[in-house]
Amino acid sequence: MNNYFGEKLKELRTEKNVGQVELAKAINVSKGIISLWENGLREPKLSNLISVSKYFKVSIDYLAGLEE
């Protein structure tokens, strides 16, 4: 399974200095879910993708690796 989303998520969090707990609270998921996404063990639902894209002000295409 390609983990492009997880890699981008971790990269965005690191760049913005946002911890997993902070992001989890902001988008209303558990810290464990953030970790699973970043490690490629789970894929986010569309509603979570939308929340992440709004939080970081990036497109879903960017998160999915369809654009730079």
Image: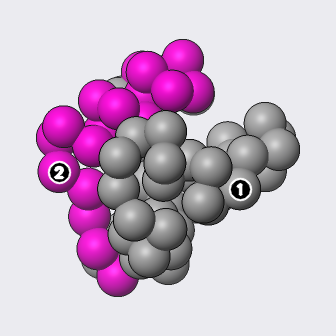
Dividing the image into 4 quarters, which one contains the N terminus? bottom left
Identified by mark 1, the residue type is Gly
Q: Is residue 66 visible?
A: no
**Do callouts 2 and 1 mark residues in contact (Cβ within 8 Å)?**
no
Q: Is residue 45 visible?
A: yes
Query: What kind of element bears circle 1?
Result: loop
Image coordinates of residue 37 in percent, x first then y, are 41, 67
Front: mark 2 or 1: 1
Give the image quarter of residue 50: top left
Residue appearing at x 60%, y 60% in the figure: 21
Examine the structure image and report whether residue 3 is included in the region drawn in magenta: no
Identified by mark 2, the residue type is Lys
Image coordinates of residue 22 in percent, x first then y, are 62, 49
- Relative to 43, say whether 29 is above or below: above
Dividing the image into 4 quarters, which one contains the C terminus? top right
Disc 2/disc 1 C-alpha distance (Å):
21 Å
Examine the structure image and report whether residue 42 is included in the region drawn in magenta: yes
**Residue pointed to by mark 2:** 45
Residue appearing at x 61%, y 60% in the figure: 20
**Residue pointed to by mark 1:** 19
- Relative to 40, say whether 7 is above or below: above
